[in-house]
Amino acid sequence: MSDTRKYLLSEDQIPRAWYNIQADLPSPPAPVLHPGTGQPIGPDDLAPLFPMALIGQEVSQDREIEIPEPVRDVYRAWRPTPLYRATALERDLDTPARIYYKHEGVSPVGSHKPNTAVAQAFYNKEAGITRIATETGAGQWGSALAYAGSLFGLEIKVYMVRVSFDQKPYRKAMMETYGAECVASPSDHTNSGRAILAATPDSTGSLGIAISEAVEDAAQRGDTSYALGSVLNHVLMHQTVIGQEAQAQLALADDRADIVVGCTGGGSNFAGIAFPFIGEKLRGGGELDVVAVEPSACPSLTRGRFAYDFGDTGKLTPLVKMHTLGSSFVPSGFHAGGLRYHGMAPLVSHAQDLGLIRSVAHTQTACFEAGVRFARAEGIVPAPEATHAVKAVIDEALRCKEEGVSRSIVFNLCGHGHFDMQAYTDYFAGALQDQPYDEQELAMALAGLPSVPAAA
């Protein structure tokens, strides 16, 4: 029998401002560079892709950015999200650890992604934009932006990574239900997509390829902006409603976080749960262990190089300093599609470089095993991405057991797996295989990193 405890906040406790970790970092992250000149970019360089309000948030040093009331009004449909004490899982593990999870799967699309999708749609609508082009991996971001677009009357075009497009047909159906157009990437809709198909007709795609297609699409039309569901500073900032709520809910439980865990692909859900806690630590809030968990088949934090690189395969984006596997790196088609990105958010990368977080990598079979164990204890089927966080939490809880210490572990259950049951079917059938990356391909991708002046 489960006696899982739920900690709830009222609607008037939805955060009124997003938290910007840049205000508290001991040193600033490296500047974003223009790929042609090698010099730091300015607002005018980004204006063809983003509304000025988001460009301002991207470079802001203010600790708090006020959340517009129309955005908070939409948030009320699912926020504040619940924080649960996973007592059943604690018993199953026979651990003295106290395990809490923030359940972002209660949003209309089943993940944390609407936290930024709604904000980006609002600012684009305010700027007079009528159409947005974007990419999506597993489809959660595409679903979220499609939902947000329907709320604000925007046309949405989504380039979905081919392997996930084939694995998760219901995500495409959800996007279309909200009125968006979804095509498999690489596609024949863009020059960059056609070039990939010409070279590799059976390409499984990647987020880097899909980003190239969406950026190219947006750059060619005056009525269209580009929107990204992770990586960029303003996107990570929009997600900090997660961690801020979790801090208030832990106070209700008369507890505090000793360990914070999040899965990492581009970095948005990890930053959403972790950055408010890291900020508290930086302002004198005590000891904290922060763990970023990534797939061993796409290990940007644990195996990537901290260097300037393009955010996309087609080299259409500015250069950002991040942990990267190289923009030409194409991961294998493992099921956690939202984590198949060659790079990591610059702010997350910078946090690791500063020693504020540590990273681990796990195989997909080990993660699905952890996800099934969590589901049987807590009753919620995690998305494949979220199983990575679950795996690390179980490891930390068992370490507490071995050491005989009680620590509070908080993690972000960033989405449910209701659209990912084929992955679980494959797991139970023994058909889910661990797919290591190609070492030679990684070496070639890293060898192709752009040359950047030492001054940068």
Image (tube, rainbow, N blue to C red):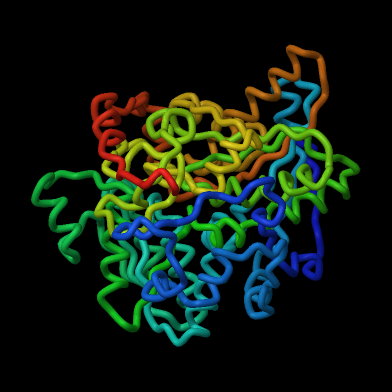
**What residue sits 61% from the left and 42% below the top?**
380
| Outermost front residue | 455
**Which one is nearer the viewer's eye here, 128 or 362?**
128
User: Residue reaching furthest top?
Assistant: 402
- Vertical placement of 200 versus 194: above or below? above
Task: Give the mark count.
Answer: 0
Q: Residue at x 48, y 64 (%)?
A: 144
Q: Is residue 231 left or right of residue 395?
A: left
Residue, x 71% and y 32% (percent of image)?
289
Q: Is residue 372 left or right of residue 192?
A: right
Question: Which residue is at a point 26% across and 61% down the rendered structure image?
Answer: 213
Vertical placement of 213 versus 92: above or below?
below
Residue closer to the observer: 417 or 81: 81
User: Where is residue 260 drawn, in percent x and y?
Assistant: 69, 38
- Of residues 318 and 17, the one nearer the viewer is 318
**Residue 103 % position (x, y):** 65, 49
Name the foreground residue: 19 vs 94.
19
Judge from the rendering whether residue 128 lies leftward or rightward of residue 95; answer left or right: left
Instruction: Quadrant for residue 356, please give it.
Output: top right
* Image vertical order of residue 239 relative to residue 445, above or below: below
Q: Residue 421: in sight, yes or no?
A: no
Q: Position of residue 387 (x, y in %)?
A: 53, 36
